[in-house]
Image (spheres, coloured by chain):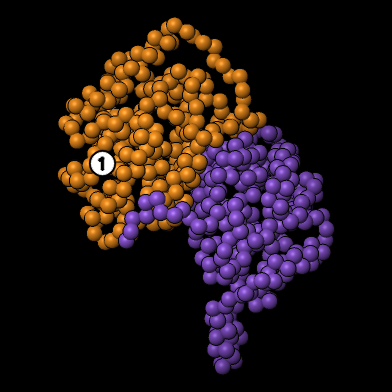
Chain colours: A orange, B purple
């Protein structure tokens, strides 16, 4: 399976992805849908079974987390800069966390993946092509679980927990001054975009309105086949890592 | 109020000439090619002709400078993050510094533009087609001067000139080409020169012989710019004129 690993578009020309033997699992869904709770539970469940797990989350890179905080405080407002800042954060995590972990055979649980960037940029620009090209260096995950929710339930859930915030309401999109109305409009657009992508990229859709245990069970059921497969394959054929074709003259800086 | 889902994408792209009333003039070339000197002289001349001129420079926003410094310190920048950081800086300057004056009909002078990224990132090992796609939102300049210079001339200028040293990333020190800064600069910038040659062909840049005397180059540059501005109708806010008249009434020297 690992030999089928590939990039979305123009990949990292200096890195052949074929020897990345771990598993890359993305949990997607809009703000406040419960991704991080489920990722914690999944990590526990996998580690108990003896799998090495790392988690990675949006804007959590060492390089960019501060810059993004600054940008959110209003120093940058245009769509390209925002998307490129997030893309830089993602690239940093991809090269410093995700790829090394996959190479060592870890299971990587990604709290959001490039699809979040696709949705946010597309909702703002109406142009799905550019952001997909920009993130063409991303690895295609082995599995994408999409926690799907309707916007009314989402609004209630977010209000019950941490409350509505400026960015999650898409206030930069100037739908109006009402936080609640703006939240519903913006999140509604994001969900529509996620739904479109669910078909395009073959997400595993999980109904996030169900009770927590049911959702967790559904997630585990989808991940399970991936694990057994790997174990069986690993014991059967320990193929020599095929690094046949370097794609370009590789000029890599010291790590 | 209409939600902008899947509305028409942005109307300008790097593939086509822009439709704004202003003009965008760019200089490209490696460090030590003399491009910044030439751009400064061009700016003086344009201003003396009564034009409103805006100047913008590669990699100059605080946000990105700070992050680049951080990445350099921890040696954690990869070719891809390096490339994306510069794209972020560019996007922010395009939006804040370049687009508004172009729309208002002013002349924008840019010291380095997307071609710098095309050349450097390719040498660092990033996919050429990817970089071009990333920058596809850029405005196509009206005029791009490429200052072509042999590597030894550039090195002599940098060592003997005002700067007296090489910058870390300009010398490609992050690439481990050589421990010696001068040698690293030579190797890295030679590769960039080769990449620029391809870019000149691809985008039809105006090549300047950067070994000529400063004033000779400037004369040539002004000729080319004059031609490019033939159809250009300058727009003035009128503030300058009003201010001049105001100060004259009091017999006070004009503020700069």
Give the residue displayed 56% in from the left and 28% down from the top.
A15
Instruction: Indicate whether A209 appears above or below B249.
Output: above
Give the residue displayed 52% in from the left and 25% down from the top.
A17
Could you say whether the residue bearing mark 1 is in a helix, strand or loop?
Answer: loop
Q: Mark 1 points at which residue?
A: A32
Q: Give the x, y percent position of residue B109.
A: 63, 63
Quarter where residue B206 is shown: bottom right
- Quadrant where the N terminus of chain B sits is bottom left
Output the chain of dot 1.
A
Q: Nearer the viewer, residue A120 or B92?
A: A120
Q: Tell me: B12 left or right of B145.
A: left
Callout 1: 10 Å neighbours few (<14), some, many (20+)? some
Instruction: Indicate whether A103 appears above or below A128.
Output: above
Quarter where residue B247 is shown: bottom right
Q: Give the x, y percent position of residue B91.
A: 51, 53
Instruction: Indicate whether B182 appears above or below B39.
Output: above
Q: Tell me: A9 left or right of B145.
A: left
Q: Is residue B188 visible?
A: yes
Instruction: Indicate whether A1 appears above or below A79.
Output: above
Q: Is residue B76 visible?
A: no
Give the residue displayed 70% in from the left and 66% down from the top.
B228
Give the residue displayed 56% in from the left and 16% down from the top.
A242
Q: Give the x, y percent position of residue A138.
A: 47, 34
- Quadrant where the C terminus of chain B sits is bottom right
């Amino acid at each position: 399976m690992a030999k089928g690993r590939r990039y979305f578009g123009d990949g990292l020309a200096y890195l052949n992805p074929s020897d990345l033997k771990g598993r890359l699992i993305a949990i997607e869904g809009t703000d406040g849908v419960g991704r991080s709770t489920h990722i914690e539970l999944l990590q526990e469940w996998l580690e108990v079974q003896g799998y090495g797990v790392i988690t990675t989350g949006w804007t959590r890179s060492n390089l960019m987390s501060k810059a993004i905080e600054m940008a959110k405080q209003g120093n940058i407002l245009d769509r390209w800069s925002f998307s490129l800042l997030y893309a830089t954060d993602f690239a940093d995590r991809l090269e410093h966390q995700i790829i090394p972990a996959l190479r060592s055979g870890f299971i990587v649980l990604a709290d959001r993946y490039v699809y979040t960037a696709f949705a946010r940029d597309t909702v703002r620009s109406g142009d799905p092509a550019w952001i997909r090209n920009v993130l063409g260096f991303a690895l295609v995950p082995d599995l994408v679980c999409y926690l799907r929710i309707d916007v009314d339930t989402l609004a209630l859930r977010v209000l019950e927990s941490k409350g509505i915030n400026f960015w999650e309401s898409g206030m930069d999109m100037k739908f109006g001054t009402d936080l609640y109305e703006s939240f519903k409009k913006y999140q509604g657009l994001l969900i529509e975009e996620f739904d479109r992508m669910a078909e395009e990229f073959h997400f595993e859709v999980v109904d996030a309105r169900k009770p927590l245990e049911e959702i967790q069970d559904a997630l585990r059921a989808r991940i399970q086949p991936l694990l057994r497969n790997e174990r069986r394959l690993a014991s059967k054929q320990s193929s020599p890592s095929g690094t046949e074709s370097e794609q370009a003259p590789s000029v890599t800086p010291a790590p | 109020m209409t939600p902008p889902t899947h509305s028409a994408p942005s109307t300008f792209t790097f593939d086509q000439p822009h439709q704004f009333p202003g003009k965008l003039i760019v200089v490209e070339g490696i460090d030590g090619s003399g491009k910044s000197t030439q751009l400064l002289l061009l700016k003086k001349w344009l201003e003396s002709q009564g034009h409103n001129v805006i100047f913008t420079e590669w990699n100059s926003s605080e946000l990105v400078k700070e992050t680049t410094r951080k990445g350099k310190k921890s040696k954690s920048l990869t070719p891809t993050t390096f490339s994306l950081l510069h794209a972020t800086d560019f996007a922010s300057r395009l939006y804040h510094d370049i687009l508004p004056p172009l729309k208002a009909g002013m002349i924008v002078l840019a010291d380095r533009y997307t071609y710098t990224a095309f050349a450097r990132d390719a040498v660092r090992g990033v996919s050429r087609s990817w970089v071009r796609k990333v920058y596809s939102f850029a405005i196509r300049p009206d005029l791009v001067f490429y200052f072509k210079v042999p590597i030894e001339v550039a090195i002599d200028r940098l060592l003997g000139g005002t700067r007296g040293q090489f910058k870390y990333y300009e010398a490609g020190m992050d690439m481990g080409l050589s421990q010696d800064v001068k040698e690293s600069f030579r190797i890295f910038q030679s590769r960039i020169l080769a990449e620029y040659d391809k870019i000149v062909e691809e985008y039809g840049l105006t090549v300047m012989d950067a070994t000529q005397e400063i004033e000779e180059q400037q004369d040539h540059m002004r000729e080319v710019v004059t031609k490019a501005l033939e159809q250009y109708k300058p727009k003035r806010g009128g503030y300058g004129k009003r201010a001049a008249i105001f100060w004259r009434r009091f017999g006070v020297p004009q503020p700069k």
